[in-house]
Image (tube, rainbow, N blue to C red):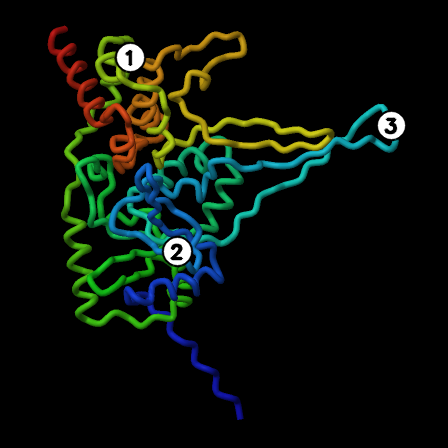
Amino acid sequence: MTPAKKAKKKIEEKIFIPQEKLNEVLERLSKHFRVWVPVLSSSSNGWTVEFRPFTIESEPFFTRQSTMPPKSVILPQGETLFQYEYVKNSDDPSKQDLILKETINAEKTLVFGARPCDVRGFVICDWVFLRGLYLDVYYKSRRENTLFATLVCQDADDACFCSSVGGGPGDMEGSDIRITSTSEGFVLEGLNDRAKEVISLCECDPPSEEQSRDAQRIQEEAKNRIIGSLDVSGSVEAVKGQFQNMGVWRDIAESCLSCGVCTYVCPTCYCFTITDEIQGLKGERLRSWDSCMFHQYTQEASGHNPRPTKLERYRNRLGHKFCYFPLRYGGVIACCGCGRCIRSCPVSIDIRSAVERVKEVHSNACVCS
């Protein structure tokens, strides 16, 4: 007699995590994934919300957008690209051989509670690191091993403008799991096959009909909300047309401090620098975040700097996002509309106003000519 096959437990595509069970579920997931969650930290200087690896002491904070995006999960602020060592050649002692050691270590990772704009930032960066002439194996390995459980955004503020640049509070492009926060907990829905493992490991029941209706209502509201009113059409022509008009760039960026905070908090800013740290015959090649707003960023060995003032540097930053990037990558705007650069700027430079100002000056110049 053929033994009956053990029935496989059905993997639910939609589950409900009660609020009070969230940490228990995240702890369970953290045994299989490196789980990152947004957490609130406060000090005498104020408070911040940052993505950090989950621990049993973590208190995930979802009630507002994080101060820093989860960019460092895929593109760390500093990382060792490889290690190396010079050793004498045993056949010819006058020569040295170079031994290289790979350092790629992309563990399975889950980002729980990112916003749609955060994930869209990676979708934009993919054009550079995965679709360009050169494949970045470090970025690729982490990207392939990272899943995003993305929160339907219900907390947009006056600085947000995700709808203006192709996203939206319910946009799930690039996400693996949709999280809808309700009054009682979280409804999770798998959006692809990659999500099945996470959904299964949660060991939670499907949502009730009422919980499903509640989640669907929130998703519909998010889908129908328009966040931001910036019109980016014509930005390519405007930036190109006003490239030499330093008057308009002075109007926009004269108060800029060149502190670079706008680039560090930006999900789509990916500039980096490469340095070697050597001790004796051993060394490491390091990659670290850089900022196009810094004077040294474009300074050449001769001392010449093609972007000598903050005006040229801000022109480059805005031009990169709304002109050069779309020209190179099929019209894609290199901005996800998260608004972090607006909230964080110490002198209140608003990139939306900057784009509108360049377009306005360009439009008037075209009419006059």
Q: How many marks?
A: 3
Q: Are marks 3 and 2 in contact (CB under 8 Å)?
A: no
Separation of marks 3 and 2 at Cα, in angstroms: 57 Å
Crowdedness near tag 1: few (<14), some (14–19) or many (≥20) residues, C-alpha within 10 Å: some
Separation of marks 3 and 1 at Cα, in angstroms: 57 Å
Of labels 2 and 1, the one closer to you: 2
- Near-viewer residue (348 or 164): 348
Q: In this view, does 165 lie above or below 10?
A: above
Q: Where is residue 164 in the image (x, y as percent from the top left)?
A: 20, 35
Separation of marks 2 and 1 at Cα, in angstroms: 48 Å
Answer with the quarter of the image where residue 341 lies.
top left
The residue depicted at 29 percent of the width and 49 percent of the height is 172
Q: Amino acid under label 2?
A: Ser
Q: Can residue 43 be seen in this view?
A: yes
Q: Amino acid under label 3?
A: Asp
Q: Position of residue 154 (x, y in %)?
A: 20, 50
Classify mark 1: helix, strand or loop: loop
Instruction: Write down the residue under mark 2.
Output: 58
Q: Position of residue 94 (x, y in %)?
A: 85, 23
Q: Is residue 44 above or below residue 209?
A: above
Crowdedness near tag 3: few (<14), some (14–19) or many (≥20) residues, C-alpha within 10 Å: few
Instruction: Write down the residue under mark 3.
Output: 92
Instruction: Write down the residue under mark 1.
Output: 243
